[in-house]
Image: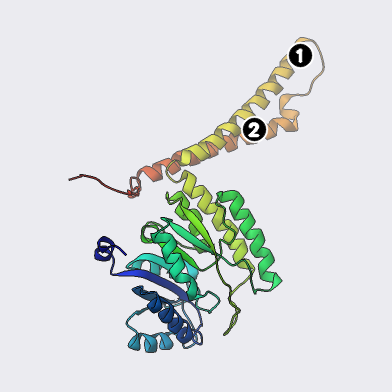
Amino acid sequence: MSKRLSQHFPVELSIVIPLLNEAESLPELTRWINRVLTQHGLTYEVLLIDDGSTDDSWEVIEQLAATDVHLRGIRFNRNYGKSAALNVGFRETTGRVVCTMDADLQDSPEELPELYRMITQDGLDLVSGWKKKRFDPLSKTIPTKLFNGVTRWISGIRLHDFNCGLKAYDSRVVKSIEVYGEMHRYIPVIAKWAGFRRIGEKVVQHQERKYGTTKFGLERFVYGFLDLMSITFVSRFRRRPMHFFGALGTISFLIGMLITLWLVGEKVWLSWHNHLSRDVTAQPLFFLALVAVVIGVQLFLAGFLAEMVQLNGSNRNDYLVKERLNLK
């Protein structure tokens, strides 16, 4: 690391590890991290985020921190989820590069030095691990492939494994984004919309689970897809909601009006030529047109109200500035 970077960052690498009931794996994991990073001469810190564990995880963290100056611990009062743990951990990091990994020993610390190099030397903003060979059951691997395919299609980010817990970030990325809900899976998407587009991928080793049981549940994919929709909408239209609601409202209103004008015009033409015809209000299509007009007006009003909320928001003019030059 350069002298300039050393002056700005107390350590070279921060490792954020969210955990839930992983007391058995923590001693082995922290020893493994220490051995690898010491061999490579990297200064580091490890933030262990206890997400409301009900086993002895916090007691183990206290014991480890008493003998290892690299360890820091944060304990939640209850289980808030992985996204909350990562968001809190990101705020506390002090390293030039921030890595995340799971606490169950399925992510190998041997990958950390290369992830660090890809950020600092290759100039990437984010590197996501790709567990090309997995040791998970089909009940997990098949939904994962579907999830990754849909996310690639919607986000345009060509990653094979969005859900891999082993990732590396330039510190600017984690200090500029907010993670909540189940959105930890979409950090690359959030980073891209924040302007961090240099996103890379590294094939990483996947270890078989050694202790405890998986916290995986299929319902997480349902919540995950809903969060993906939220991210996509908020990222594109947060500062211009009228562009979304107004466009849909205008289209709906115009369709309704055109159908109504067609029905009225048809009625007038048939009457003019003495042809029998139904009343406009007796046709089902008229009521569909009326619904389209009403929906159009409501969508337009929703866009207008959203614009008013945005204009009165305290962060309406908060923008991420990359560099400043010769400014007083």
Where residue 239 sits in the image (x, y, percent)?
A: 42, 43
What's the CA distance linking mark 2 and mark 1? 23 Å
Can residue 301 be spotted in the picture? Answer: no
Residue 156 on image: x %, y %: 56, 48
For the point 67% across and 64% down, the residue is 143
Q: Which mark is residue 271?
A: 1
The local secondary structure at tag 2 comes to helix
Q: Residue furthest right?
A: 276
Q: Is residue 142 visible?
A: yes
Q: Residues within 10 Å of mark 2 (few under 14, many from 20)?
A: some
- Judging depth in this view, the residue of 76 and 46 nearest the camera is 46
Q: Give the colouring mode of the picture.
A: rainbow
- The answer to whether 103 appears left or right of 220 in the picture is left
- In this picture, is 158 found above or below 110? above
Quadrant containing the N terminus is: bottom left
Residue appearing at x 40%, y 78% in the figure = 39
Foreground pick, 269 / 230 = 230
Secondary element at image label 1 = helix
Left of 243 or right of it: where is 288? right
- Residue under pointer 2: 290
**In the image, which disc is placed on residue 76?**
none
Badge 2 or badge 1: first in the primary sequence: 1
From the image, state whether disc 2 or disc 1 is nearer to you: 2
* Type of amino acid at the residue the image marks with label 2: Leu
Q: Residue furthest top?
A: 273
| Dot 1 crowding, Cα within 10 Å, few <14, some 14–19, many 20+ | few
The amino acid on which the numbered mark 1 sits, given as a three-letter code, is: Ser
Q: Tell me if label 2 and label 1 are in contact, CB under 8 Å.
A: no
Residue 22 sits above or below residue 232 on the image: below
Q: Residue at x 62, y 66 (%)?
A: 132
Task: List x then y, in percent, for residue 200.
Answer: 50, 57
Q: Residue at x 33, y 73 (%)?
A: 43
